Amino acid sequence: MARRKLVVAMMMHETNTFSPVPTPLGAFRPLAGEAALEEFRDTNTQLGGFLQVARELGAEVSVPLAAGAHPSGYVERGAYEDMCDAIVGAVRAGCDAAFLALHGAMVAEHVDDGEGELLRRIRAVAPRLPIAVGLDFHSHMTAPMIENATVVTGYRTYPHIDMGETGQRAGRTLVRALNGEVEPVMVWSSRPMMTSTLVHAPSRQPMKDIMDMAIAAE
Ligand SMILES: [Zn+2]
């Protein structure tokens, strides 16, 4: 089999739309290529997990963007466009699949659903591209995110300690799909509830039973 070509990228921000502090590109410390590989290889991050799966696969890897900022206000329009362009450009150049480390709560000045819009743009240039997405536990799931990805999975711990594992799970599930071993199907809905983040820990009730049921259902 020919060596698979993967686009592996990270674009992470937990946007607080109440914060007056805008988030420029510089806040993301964007890296690419060899610099990104050196920074993230063998780290307990989603990107580290994805790179591990890519290595096991013996894949050719392109890292057009590795960018993450601390929680702050709206992502500046130019920053969002530059980051999306880097990822979409790499996909357009040709690849067999994409591994994306996202947060799931990005809001830009001109885009409410940062992750959904990124995925929509990727599928616009590569309609059938298999895409694995890893998310933080604290994400705003949206229909465009589910419709424009093949595999979406997120952290299962809070405080978060399973970032690398999450990237590996997302990547390995997509590889199984590429190999024709599984056909991932995602079902998504939102409950009409406002819950306190202080009782979200999946290791404690009431979340424990809910998380255990979700994991068993997979
Ligand atoms: Zn979180």
Image (tube, rainbow, N blue to C red):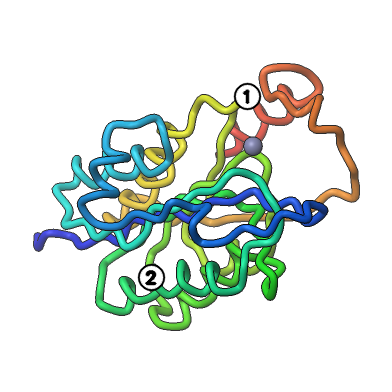
Label total for image = 2
Q: Residue at x 59, y 72 (%)?
A: 117
Going by the numbered disc 2, the residue's amino acid type is Ala
- Looking at this view, is 160 or 166 the one in front? 160
- Residue tagged by mark 2? 86
The quadrant of the rendering that contains the C terminus is top right
- Residue tagged by mark 1? 159
Alpha-carbon distance for marks 2 and 1?
Answer: 31 Å
Going by the numbered disc 1, the residue's amino acid type is Pro
Local crowd size for mark 1, using a 10 Å CA cut-off: few (<14), some (14–19), many (≥20): few
Q: Residue at x 26, y 69 (%)?
A: 95
The quadrant of the rendering that contains the N terminus is bottom left
Q: Residue at x 78, y 52 (%)?
A: 19
> Residue 96: horizontal and vertical position, in percent?
26, 66
Q: Residue at x 36, y 47 (%)?
A: 171
3 horizontally vs 84: left or right: left
27 horizontally vs 42: left or right: right
Q: Secondary structure at mark 1?
A: loop
Pick whichever of labels 2 and 1 is earlier in the sequence: 2
Query: Would you place residue 22 above or below residue 51 in this image?
Result: below
> Residue 213: horizontal and vertical position, in percent?
67, 30
Q: Which mark is residue 214?
A: none
Local crowd size for mark 2, using a 10 Å CA cut-off: few (<14), some (14–19), many (≥20): some
> Residue 50: horizontal and vertical position, in percent?
34, 44
- Looking at this view, is 99 or 172 the one in front? 99
